Image (spheres, rainbow, N blue to C red):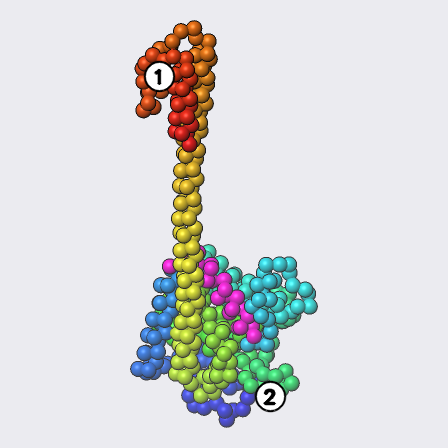
Amino acid sequence: MRREDFGLRSPGMLVPSVGDALAFLPNGLPPELTISRDLLMATEEARAAVAELTGQARLIRNINLIIRPLARREAVLSSRIEGTQTEIRELILQEAGPEPAAEDTDVHEVLNYLATIDLAQQWFDDGRTLDKSLLKELHARLLRGVRGEEHHPGMIRTLDVYVGNRSQGFRDARFVPPPPEHVEPLLDNLVTFTRGPLAYGPLVDSAIAHYQFEAIHPFEDGNGRIGRLLIPLQLLSRGVLDRPLLYLGPYLFDHDREYRELLLAVSTRGAWNDWIMFILEAIGSSAEDARTRVGRVLALREVMRTAAESAAARESRAQALLAEAAHRAEEIESVERKVREEEGRLAGVKAEIVNAKKPLLVVDAALPWMPYAVVENFTRSEAFENYERAVKALRGFAD
């Protein structure tokens, strides 16, 4: 860093670092800002987008249907800003299957970031607040078993660090955070700011806090991912979000160069307004994107509900048809039983006619429902004819 790059409006001061290099020591929070009309309007627009997202998300009974995909996307794209190359499909496959191979460091790192998001959510679900212990636990989980594990996960740095290519060294680095003796008090001030009375509203305060975290660079490695996660965590702690639905990683990945330049611009020339406007745009755009994804889930749910109702209606009709068929089968069985009974009775009548020695008086009282039933004297031949008519009528009825 060069002294001439830092103007009078810089929110901090340059102090000696390693060798003859300089480090940037940021002022404590909150900064003194002049809130412009444009900034107020941008804040309201971003807040409205977040409110629409949370309102729409409440329509989903199982909110994990959307939370998990958003968290995966954040883990992949926020890690990609740091150079970690993993696709979402790889992450899903690893979640569903065994642990990735030891040499698959990129997937390990993204899985760790996803686990870090889960840890943060559990922290708030348990009723705990955003504090320094949370930041340390998140950092420890982020670097567990991956590149950077040698950089003391979960511990505030005690070494000087710089931001830039490793070959540059401290003197030519893009940015040198404050020396380690200043880190603890600056981090305490940051946590107090995130938990204390709002300075400029929850969205603007989250933009300020993210810058400050990156300027302090409290850990030896992994600061970028923890710093980006700090924004939704702060919105959760302030009640702007009730569930972790908003992540800025995808937007910041798409605007990576502008993101880095504006971070540095705050340090060098106090470009707070440009930085806050950028973060507000990121919040609003990310909320709109998440709301679109929630809308797709709701639309899919409606399609599935309609299909389920249609299937239920078809099943109901099928059950009705089966019940009707069963009823018809019972009726047919009843008629067949009557036919068998009448055939047996008429067979007995035939036998009596054959064996009779005199004309018979045939009273067809057993078949009162048959229209031809009569009472008359029959000769034997006439009795046979009456029997045949009775059998024919019975069979006609059965058919």
Residue 60, magenta (yes or no):
yes
For numbered disc 1, what is the local secondary structure? loop
- The mark nearer the N terminus, 2 or 1, is 2
Please provide the residue range marked out in magenta: 59-80
Q: Nearer the viewer, residue 302 or 13?
A: 302
Q: Tell me where residue 376 sits by quadrant.
A: top left
Seen in the image, is 234 located left or right of residue 142?
Answer: left
Is residue 23 magenta-colored?
no
Q: Position of residue 352 (x, y in %)?
A: 44, 11
Q: Nearest the camera: 275 or 172? A: 275
**Residue type marked 2:** Arg
Q: Which residue is mark 1?
A: 364
Name the residue: 40% across, 55% down: 306
Q: Are marks 2 and 1 in contact (CB under 8 Å)?
A: no
The residue lying at 59 percent from left, 59 percent from top is 96
The amino acid type of the residue labelled 1 equals: Asp
Query: Mark 2 or mark 1, which is nearer to you?
Result: 1
Q: Identify the residue shown where x is 66% and y is 68%.
A: 104
Q: Quadrant of the N terminus?
A: bottom right
Q: Which residue is mark 2?
A: 171
The rendered magenta stretch, by its main secondary structure, is classed as helix
Q: Position of residue 329 (x, y in %)?
A: 44, 33
Quadrant holding the C terminus: top left
Residue shown at 48% from the left, 83% from the top: 258
Residue 30, image x, y percentages: 40, 76
Residue 225 in view (yes/no): yes
Q: Residues within 10 Å of mark 1 (few under 14, many from 20)?
A: some
